[in-house]
Image (cartoon, rainbow, N blue to C red):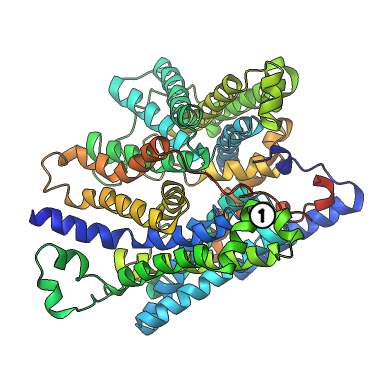
Amino acid sequence: MALIVTLLAASLALCMPVLLAALGELVNERSGVLNVGLEGVMLFGAFGAAFTYQLWGNFALAFGFGLLAGLCAWAILGALYLWRQTEQIVTGLLFNLFAFGLTATLFTRFEGDVGQVRALPKVSFGPLTDIPILGPILFNQNIVVYAAIIIVVGVSLLLNRTWFGLRIKAAGEIPLVAYENGVPVMRLRWIALGIGCVLASLGGAALVLAESGIFLPGVTSGAGFIALAMVVLGRFSAYGILLASIFFGVAASLQFYSEQLPFASGGARYFWVAFPYIATLVALAVWRKARYPAAMGKEFKV
Amino acid sequence: MAVSDLMTRPSRGLTVVLRVVFVVGATLFVLFLLGINIFTSFPSFWRGTLGNPYSLAITLTVMAVITLTAAAALIPFRAGFVNLGGEGQLVAGATGATVVALTIGEPGSVWVAIVCVVVAMVAGALWAGIASFLYERFGANEVISTLMLNFVAFTVAEYFTSTVWPDKVAPQTISIPDATNFPLFGKFGSTPWAVLFAVIVWGLAWWLIQRTNFGFRIKATGESPMASLRFGYAPVRTRVISVFLGGAAAGLAGAVLILVVNRALVLDISQSYGYVGIAAALLIALRPALLPLGAIAFAMISVGGNTLAAVSKVSPTVSLVAVSVCVLLLLATRSRRGSS
């Protein structure tokens, strides 16, 4: 029992970077931009955050500069996807390669300056933490977890309850009709891509500051790709993505407790390391009713 | 994905010159910003890539590997299947080759090496086949599934390097027997064999896509699956076979890395060759006849980048920046009027 509680608490914390990135990707996919460069944006955010934390040792500044790095990624990706209208899948993939190369190169250059990060402190809820089972899972987490939950609600409200969200969805489903009706499709896609990049870079920052505690080349190890899958698994809804991410978190946290689980010690450990990816694959295949936004990934020409 | 979007028609005259000058200049500028002295380092770039037999051998081997991974991207791309899993298929092939070589063990022979190559190609093809199966049977998005399978392949390789045949010092398996190799050519070692494989795959890819009935079906499936269905071109079967062929090419690249370069399964054996292959395929706008051209360009950047990085004391990953910036700018400077 205690093990299950620890596991759930750990998995909730573990899935937050993926959740944040997936929420960002949700917004820009709904507007018609498929950003496969998500992994690269996360790397930007992670590097910015780790570098800043090493310089000033301040979590708020670290998140801020992670976000700033995300805005740089936004400028690059926007220029490619939206201004030059390059093919989005391969552009995103090449951006990932670029981000990996760039952050790895900068990391080597400033080796001494990008090192260990102190773990993000947990938010204190006083007596609430002592509630059996629920306490350790829900009321003993770091600030990222609570912020991410609020962002889930925010993104859902934004997409489903505001004019802005309606227009974003129109831009992603029937851009030409939307354009004819006075919706500035291109400007909306720029904004949506910006939201996507900001959230993904925050996810990357959270990955370093709250989870791995250190920046290494390729530290995201596919979190951005998993976030892409989570958007499909969550069927393009914010709450769906929350559920999908928690599912991923549980799958991913199993490897850390493999020594305590009877079916996961020794060589079988590697199965559990690969398990989140395999589980995502299987879930993608089984849970296939997701309907993609009709204009996602397509060039928009007036 | 619209295949035709990636197959830019070559622009003519001054435009193409301006474009190339801009792309090369901008890439060099990025390298300069990252701390590589582009003005003084040309001699060391030359020495590090083609200037002496030793580095020429390395460049040719890397060129062979990139030709193979570029073919692994190109063939499925032409059939409309976005295979981003060259990396994982390469690792699957390398793992297959290592398992064969180490299971048969000492003393080893040329025949074992041949079996290694065959098994690597089958392993790569099957690894690609998983994504193909999920795509055709369940409609699972191939962009995501091929990327996921890359990470699964890395873990499988990690299992072999750390549990089954771990080396005592480095994160890799023990070396494969010396005799499990092709006949050597003096200074060049077994590099000519790598080049031979690449040339064969290049020729086959070109012949298949441009000169055969099946190649026509591949292109038709990529351009319009619906139309090729109406014409009785069996788009599903065509697509599946082309994905298998791509996977086999990537697997062969894995075997080349094991037999010619590393002689053991190293943890990060691929060093992004799978992704660089995709970039190379895009550089040549998915035209199979030009495969070696894209490969030599990026092989020189990768290998020369290592030398430059060593001279300028920069991380060798800087060559990945050069490769990606180069192709991104090439895609971005495409004339938009031409494509519509």
Q: Which residue is mark 1?
A: B328
Q: Camera-side residue: A114 or A292?
A: A292
In the rendered structure, the residue with mark 1 lies on which chain? B
Residue B207 is at least partly visible in this image = no
* Residue A283 x/y as whole percent: 37, 40
* Residue A113 x/y as whole percent: 39, 75
Query: Position of B86 compared to B113: left or right?
Result: right
* Residue A99 x/y as whole percent: 53, 60
Q: Amino acid at mark 1?
A: Leu
For residue B50, which quarter of the picture?
A: top right
* Residue B6 x/y as whole percent: 71, 42
Picture residue at 8% right of the left edge, 53% below the top: A1
In the depicted structure, whether residue A148 falls above or below residue B56: below
Picture residue at 62% right of the left edge, 22% below the top: B235
Q: Residue furthest right?
A: B13
Q: Camera-side residue: B187 or B292?
A: B292
Picture residue at 39% right of the left edge, 53% below the top: A240
For residue A215, which quarter of the picture?
A: bottom left
Residue A283 is at least partly visible in this image = yes
From the image, which quarter does the C terminus of chain A lie in? bottom right
Q: Secondary structure at mark 1?
A: helix
